Image (cartoon, rainbow, N blue to C red):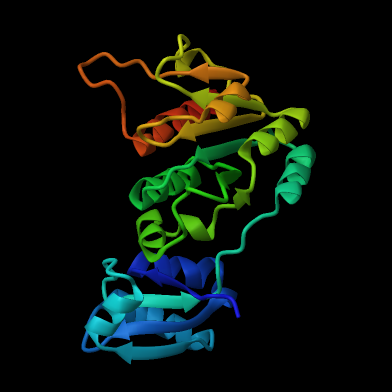
Amino acid sequence: MSKKEILPGIHTVASLLRWQPQRAHSIWLEQNKNNPRIEQLVGHAAKLGISVQQVQRAKLDQLCEGTQHQGIAASCSPTPLVDEQDLVSQITAASTPPLILILDEVSDPHNFAACLRTADAAGVDAVVIPQRNSAPLSPTVHKIASGATLRLKIVKTTSLARFIDTIKKSGVWVYGAAGEASSSIYQSNLTQASTIVMGAEGQGLRRLTQERCDQLYSLPMLGGVESLNVSVATGIFLYEAVRQRSN
């Protein structure tokens, strides 16, 4: 039997009931928690035929692995992942240039979740992560992503290098973020089918990943700091693509 996922927080549960109610098994409420928004969600869940259970706060804390849950969480089936080949087929058939985000071994759950939230806001078509050394889709990630895990297409690949080679053959340009790059992201052309690749904090892009990028870009660093948090840098790169595509 597949392990259930726990989605904590008012906004995350609301997104589940709106976007993927078929995945929900039950809603867990903190006893004696009075909140109008929670009451609305309970009513919505009841209309959908989803079980609602009240539990003590300690039990809810345990279910949510210590993540701040605001008195509500949902138990649901695991996040459906998109197959690599299905994504490639969708890229090939797309009527507009796709925008893909690759996160190369981003293991911190807060950074991972923030990247997912920004990707959803920027209209990214899919997020690709390696099977190993990436943050799991934990209660913390679901909560911080604020519903983004329910709307994004997420792909796990056993080989990022192979995946990059495949999408390049499908006509997608691959651009990596690297602090040492001589070209700025503001010199890029992200209006075409593009993949932006972000590396983990500390190590950045792995060598095999970096070697497969068509071009490396950096961010102008005008002050004393040497680098930005990966989620902040991801936001800047993605919204540069949004800006270019809006012109």
Q: Position of residue 31 (x, y in %)?
A: 24, 88
State left or right for residue 119 relative to residue 131.
left
Q: Residue at x 54, y 66 (%)?
A: 19
In this rendered view, identify the residue nearer to me: 23 or 4.
4
Relative vertical location of residue 163 with respect to residue 169 in this rendering, above or below: below
Relative vertical location of residue 161 with respect to residue 89 in this rendering, above or below: above
State left or right for residue 33 relative to residue 234.
left
Q: Position of residue 20 (x, y in %)?
A: 56, 69
Image mark count: 0
Q: Residue at x 49, y 73 (%)?
A: 17
Relative vertical location of residue 22 with respect to residue 203 in this rendering, above or below: below
Q: Position of residue 38 (x, y in %)?
A: 32, 78
Relative vertical location of residue 229 with respect to residue 223 in this rendering, above or below: below
Residue 225 figure quarter: top left
Q: Residue at x 49, y 57 (%)?
A: 149
Residue 163 figure quarter: top right
Image quarter of the C terminus: top right
In this rendered view, identify the residue nearer to me: 202 or 25.
202
Q: Position of residue 105 (x, y in %)?
A: 48, 42
Image quarter of the N terminus: bottom right
